[in-house]
Image (spheres, rainbow, N blue to C red):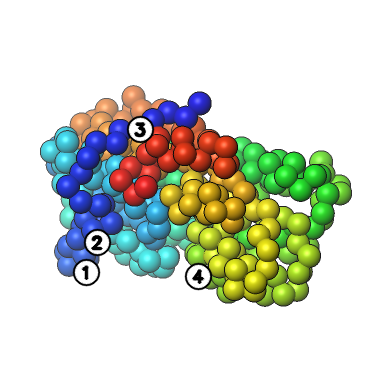
Amino acid sequence: MIRKLSSRKRPQRWSIRAAAVVTSAALVLTGCSTDGSMTSGQAGGSGSKKIGVSMSFLNQFYAAAVEGMQDEADKRGYELVVVNANSNSSQQVSQVQNLASQQVGAIIFAQLDAASGGASLGAANSANVPVIAVDQVPAAGNYVTYIGSDSVKMGQQACEFLVKTIGGRGEIAIVQGVPGSSTQLQRTEGCDKVLTASPSVKVVSTTSANWDQNTAANVFANVLTANPNLNGIFAQNDDMALGAVTATDSANHSPIPMVTIDGFPAAYDAIEKGQITATISQQPYLMGQLAVQNAILSIEGKGASIPKEQIQQAVLVTKDNVQQASAAKYYGNQG
């Protein structure tokens, strides 16, 4: 069942607000244990009314998450300082260090990769700033909680639907995200479970497009040239799926059955047009709200009451239920 999120009206689209928040933040800003134990840095209790947000990059998923964060922070009377690493590991580490030096009460963190994850959490832990992890499980360091979806399950569900769609046999291509990131590894693990049990399905191409639409368009153009008779595609996120759609259209190739993950509004449009077969839709707006709620609890010294892992429901969206999914506002005002 699709759970409807809040769809109250806002004076303007978040994409405009996001640019203002990130720009103003940019003007201000110039390896630990993974056992889950709470260090003094995770205990919170600083009383600060400022929450830092470190985003690895911004796409529709993260924009919706930050919209949820901003709305919840506004409602609770907290200032949100959002920074965007633009897919640069060292920049993300530097930004987290700067957030910690600003004495924010907590940091909401979306890891880019293992390199940025361990160093960023190390900086936050050293400054005794509690960390709320969103979407990506940090590679190292102490964090209060992880809020996200079950990427292994989503990868498995996506590939099960793809295999069913192509009749249990044929050649498929896989487009993966940033190598070594938690979601790339977990979505691969989930899909591999299905492919191992599907001997008549042959993977003829596995490439990486780093979660990026433009990169995927370029990469998949080459994949399609080398494999013109593909029967199916598994893209590990919607950005890359949309890039594959661009490559397919540019080659004047008929649509190829494609299953992806995230639930972007743009992916819903592509499903309605027959360009994408299905997406596993997450709930980023809700995740953003929950992240701020947990950050505030940590600031108030109540971090120990928060579950270590908070897995949110994901929904298979096809042409049969795409209208219902769109109405659910999983992406807040982005849809």
Question: Which residue corresponds to mark 3?
Answer: 5
Q: Secondary structure at mark 4?
A: helix
- Residue name at image x 13 percent, y 38 percent: 77
Whether residue 294 sits left or right of residue 250 in the image: it is left
Question: Which residue corresponds to mark 4?
Answer: 214
**Label 2 with label 4: CB-CB less than 8 Å:** no
**Residue 196: x percent and y percent?**
80, 45
Which one is earlier in the sequence, the residue at label 1 or at label 4? Answer: 1
Label 3 Cα crowd, 10 Å radius (few <14 / some 14-19 / many 20+): some
- Residue name at image x 42 percent, y 65 percent: 87
- Residue at the far right in the pictured view: 200
Q: Secondary structure at mark 3?
A: loop
Question: Which residue corresponds to mark 2?
Answer: 19
Q: CA distance from mark 3 to mark 1?
A: 36 Å
Q: Amino acid at mark 3?
A: Leu
Is 265 in front, or is 298?
265
Q: Of tags 1 and 4, which is closer to the observer? A: 4
Is 289 in front, or is 334?
334
Q: CA distance from mark 2 to mark 1?
A: 17 Å
Q: Amino acid at mark 4?
A: Asn
Q: Amino acid at mark 2?
A: Ala
**Residue 112: x percent and y percent?**
45, 58
Q: CA distance from mark 1 to mark 4?
A: 29 Å
Give the label on residue 30, or none.
1
Which one is earlier in the sequence, the residue at label 2 or at label 1? Answer: 2
Which one is earlier in the sequence, the residue at label 3 or at label 4? Answer: 3
Label 1 Cα crowd, 10 Å radius (few <14 / some 14-19 / many 20+): few
- Residue name at image x 83 percent, y 49 percent: 169
**Residue 306: x percent and y percent?**
36, 28
Q: CA distance from mark 2 to mark 3?
A: 24 Å
Q: Secondary structure at mark 2?
A: helix
